[in-house]
Image (spheres, rainbow, N blue to C red):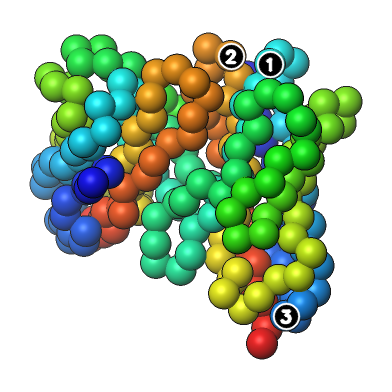
Amino acid sequence: AQSVSQHNHHVILSEAASLELGCNYSYGGTVNLFWYVQYPGQHLQLLLKYFSGDPLVKGIKGFEAEFIKSKFSFNLRKPSVQWSDTAEYFCAVKGYGQNFVFGPGTRLSVLP
Amino acid sequence: NAGVTQTPKFQVLKTGQSMTLQCAQDMNHEYMSWYRQDPGMGLRLIHYSVGAGITDQGEVPNGYNVSRSTTEDFPLRLLSAAPSQTSVYFCASRPGTGGYGYTFGSGTRLTVV
């Protein structure tokens, strides 16, 4: 069965700091990988996805993620965070013929 | 373009009551799913559907029922509400092919007292 782990439960950064959120998954086959963001009181919105091809994926709002197949990882990065990036971030994996599985989420707090 | 519409946004139920959470999408997506979100547990799949007339159980189906009579609608029924069903419920839809992610509704916050 698929599973997704996210390294950090809560990350606190100051504005302009760099961000990296870890995501690892367990599934041996072909996968689609996703990062979603949930701003306070709102629903989940897609930040970026990996389907195939270039393992470095660029998403909205300056976020990017790198798929490293050998490490079963799909870490999310942003060079310089803003206060408005305060939100919860969810990694998700979908194996071929499988349902989506979401990680437990990482809460990001950006201090002004 | 409304996307995925969920109603109601908030609901308080007494233990043992039943209710239906409504979900509708206008994107002609084949796949629809219901998730519940609880603190520290991410999203857990309750039920899903791969098309009209086809539904299946997810990770936490007990106490919930679904049907999919049309492509657009995918209601979730709580048969006899329990305090353990206090949660935020999200409906989501996606195309059947193409590696697309889910589009989520705005959620229903349910409290069972």
N-term mark: 2 or 3: 3
Residue A86 horizontal/vertical position (percent)? 59, 71
Residue A85 horizontal/vertical position (percent)? 60, 69
Residue lying at 67% horizontally and 59% vertically, measured from the top left: A62
Chain that bears disc 2: A
Question: What amino acid is at disc 3?
Answer: Glu
Q: Nearer the viewer, residue B30 or A109?
A: B30
* Kind of element beneath mark 1: loop
Label drawn at residue A30: 1
Chain that bears disc 3: A
* Kind of element beneath mark 2: loop
Q: Are marks 1 and 2 in contact (CB under 8 Å)?
A: yes
* Kind of element beneath mark 3: loop
Chain that bears disc 1: A
Circle nearer the viewer, 2 or 3: 3
Q: Which residue is mark 2?
A: A96
N-term mark: 1 or 3: 3
Question: What amino acid is at disc 2?
Answer: Tyr
Q: Would residue A10 be found to the left or right of residue A39 on screen?
A: right
Label drawn at residue A66: none
Q: Are marks 1 and 3 in contact (CB under 8 Å)?
A: no
Q: Which residue is mark 3?
A: A15
What whole-number distance in Å separates the C-alpha atoms at marks 2 and 3? 39 Å
Q: Quadrant of residue B66?
A: top left
Residue lying at 65% horizontally and 33% vertically, measured from the top left: A50
Q: Please, is residue B110 above or below residue B5 in the view?
A: below
- For the C terminus of chain B, the quadrant is bottom left
Residue A55 horizontal/vertical position (percent)? 78, 33
**Does residue B85 show up?**
no
Question: What amino acid is at disc 1?
Answer: Thr
Residue A61 horizontal/vertical position (percent)? 60, 60
